[in-house]
Structure formats: structure tokens, C-alpha cells
Image (cartoon, grey):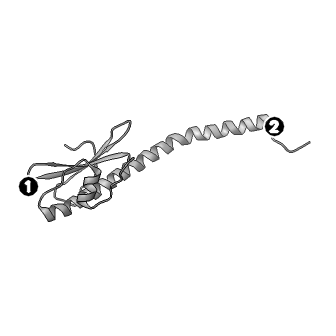
Amino acid sequence: MGKAFSLIEVLVITVIIGIVVAFAMPQYAKMQERSLDNEARGYIAMIQAAEKVYNVESRTFFASNDHTKLNDTLQISLPLGNSKWAYSAIVSGSPPNDTLCAQAKRNGFDNRYWHMMDSGTDSIQPVSGKCP
């Protein structure tokens, strides 16, 4: 007879592929979220660096939660439109003792935050949570 697959062979292959997908999807979701976190940390580091330059030029920080204003004033390129993150720069205190916190808030189901505080050192790292 012909060399066609039987119905049982097709069903077995379908079940095997289903099992592989069931194991792969959680790992894919974790990698996707890790990638989104890295994106946010990279952009808040960029905001932080641009704010330091702005501070040197104007002796103050620029506070805003509007991507367009941050992009225009700090001359950076945060993603606009359908972004997974909402970026903001929060200033506390008054010049010359003001401090800056660059923050990214996850748009979506978990409202996750990353922030980076200006402490006068170059070794600061993004931290999970809202700006204090």
C-alpha cells in the first residue's frame, strides 16, 4: 500500500508537540518578562544619564511623567505610543540639594516598578519598586 501516516501516528505526534509546547511556554513568558525588565532598566539609566547632563547645564533636574517632554527636554528617545512602560523623572527637594529618581512603571497586569536614585555616585543600579 501507500506510505501515508495513519491516524494514530498523527495523533501521537500532535500529543508530543503539545507536551513540548506546554513545557516551553512558561519559559518563554519568563524570558519575555526578563527582556521587558531589562528594557526598563536600560531606559531609566538613560534618563538618569541625561538628567545628570541637564543638571550640569541648568543646575536643576527636570521632572516630568510625559515621555514627549522627557524626550524633548533631555534629548533622549524613550519609546512613544504603545509602550509596555511609563517612564517618569521625579524630583524631591529644591536646588541645589534636590535629588532625582528616574522611574519606570509597567503598564498592564502587574504594575511593576523599577527606579534609580541619584545619589551622586556613578555606581548606582536600577532597583525594583517605586521611587521613595
State yes or no: discs 1 and 2 in contact (Cβ < 8 Å).
no
In which quadrant of the rendered view does residue 52 lie?
Answer: bottom left
Residue 6 marker: 2
Measure the C-alpha gap from mark 1 to mark 2.
Answer: 78 Å
- Counting other residues with Cα less than 10 Å from the Cα at mark 2, is it few (<14), some (14-19), or many (20 or more)? few
Residue 95 marker: 1
From the image, state whether disc 1 or disc 2 is nearer to you.
1
* Viewer-side residue, 121 vs 33: 33
Q: From the top left corner, tell me how far across and down residue 54 is, in percent.
A: 18, 61
Instruction: Name the residue type under label 1.
Output: Pro
User: Is residue 57 rendered to the left or right of residue 126?
Assistant: left
Q: From the top left corner, tell me how far across and down residue 32 is, in percent.
A: 45, 46
Identify the residue at horizontal 86%, vertical 45% (top origin): 3
Q: Earlier in the sequence, mark 1 or mark 2?
A: 2
* Viewer-side residue, 34 vs 107: 107
* Viewer-side residue, 19 vs 55: 55
In terms of secondary structure, where does tag 2 sit? loop
Q: In this view, does 97 lie above or below 11?
A: below
In terms of secondary structure, where does tag 1 sit? loop
Number of labels in the image equals: 2
- Quadrant containing the N terminus in the rendered view: top right
Instruction: Name the residue type under label 2.
Output: Ser
Q: From the top left corner, tell me how far across and down residue 36 is, in percent.
A: 40, 48
User: Is residue 30 rendered to the left or right of residue 8?
Assistant: left
